[in-house]
Image: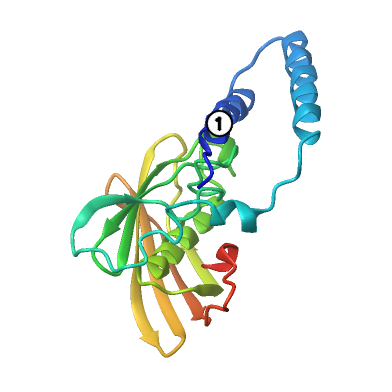
Amino acid sequence: MKDWSALEHAAAAMRRLNRAVATFDVPDAELHEIARTAMELSRRLEAGQARDKHDDIATLPSFPAAADPPPPAFDADALEFDAFSLGGGRLNPSSIGIDFRRDGSRAVSARCTVHGMFQGPPGRVHGGVLALIVDELMALVNRLAGRRAFTVRLQVHLRAPAPVDVELTFRAWEHLVDGRKIVMRAEGGVAGALIVEADALFVEVAAPADTDPTTAR
C-alpha cells in the first residue's frame, strides 16, 4: 500500500494556509509575497504527474471503510469515509474536517467545527456545506452496511442558523430499505438545538467485476 503521509502533511499545511488567508488581515505587501510563493509552489506541483482518484483511493487499506456491520455501540470507533473527500478527507487540502464515529449498526454520528472560510451569511455555515456533511454521513451508513449506493435525491431542511467556529453534532441513520432503494435520514444541532434535518434516497448498484471505488457511495 502507498504511504500517503507526505501528502497528509502537505494537505494539513494547506488547510492551515487556506484558513489563515481567509481569516487574518495583513499588509498588502505580505499578501503579494504569499501569492508569489504560492504560485511558485503550484508550478512545482504541476511539474509532477497528474494523479487519478480511482488509482489513489484503491491504495488505501481502509477502503472500503468497515464493510462489515459494526457492533451496536455508541461513539465506539472513528471511521473514514473517503480520505480525499471535501468533507472529512485528511488528504484533501480544502476539507472541512469531519470526525465520523460508529453509532450502532446502521447509524453514524459526527462532530465538526466548521471554519469561517465556509461561511455563507456572516457568522453562519453555508447551507451547501451542511448538505455536504449530511450527505457524507448518510453515504457512510451505506458503507457500514456493506452497500455500494448512489445518492439520487437529497432534501435538506435548514431549521436554524449554524454558527461557524463552534462544534456541531450530526447523526445519520438508515430509515427504510425497499429492495435496491434505501431511505436515509439525518439531523444536526448545536448545543442541543436543531439546525438541520435531511432525508435522502439512495439506490444500491451491483458492484462490477472491476469495482470503481470512487463510486462507492
Q: Residue 168 at what x, y percent from top left?
A: 37, 45
Between 161 and 65, the residue placed more toward the observer is: 65
Q: Residue 20 at what x, y percent from top left?
A: 59, 23
Task: Give the mark count.
Answer: 1
Colouring method of the image: rainbow
Q: Residue 37 at what x, y percent from top left?
A: 75, 18
Q: Amino acid at mark 1?
A: Ala
In the displayed structure, 136 sits above or below 21; it is below
The residue sitting at the front extreme is: 1
The residue singled out by tag 1 in the image is 6
Q: Residues within 10 Å of mark 1 (few under 14, many from 20)?
A: few
Q: Look at 47% across and 64% down and name the residue there.
A: 157
- In the structure shown, which secondary structural element does the residue marked by tag 1 occupy? helix
Between 163 and 142, the residue placed more toward the observer is: 142
The residue sitting at the bottom extreme is: 179
Between 132 and 82, the residue placed more toward the observer is: 82
Q: Give the quarter of the image for residue 121.
A: top right
Asked if one can make out residue 93 in the rendered structure from this viewpoint, the answer is yes
Between 170 and 119, the residue placed more toward the observer is: 170
Q: Look at 47% across and 59% down and name the residue there.
A: 136
Q: Look at 58% across and 29% down and name the residue there.
A: 10
Asked if one can make out residue 194 in the rendered structure from this viewpoint, the answer is no
Answer with left or right where residue 199 lies relative to residue 107.
right
In the displayed structure, 114 sits above or below 205; it is above
Q: Look at 52% across and 39% down and name the residue there.
A: 3
Q: Residue 107 at what x, y percent from top left?
A: 31, 65
Answer with left or right where residue 111 lies relative to residue 128.
left
In the displayed structure, 21 sits above or below 196; it is above
Answer with left or right where residue 12 lies relative to residue 112.
right
In the displayed structure, 5 sits above or below 50; it is above
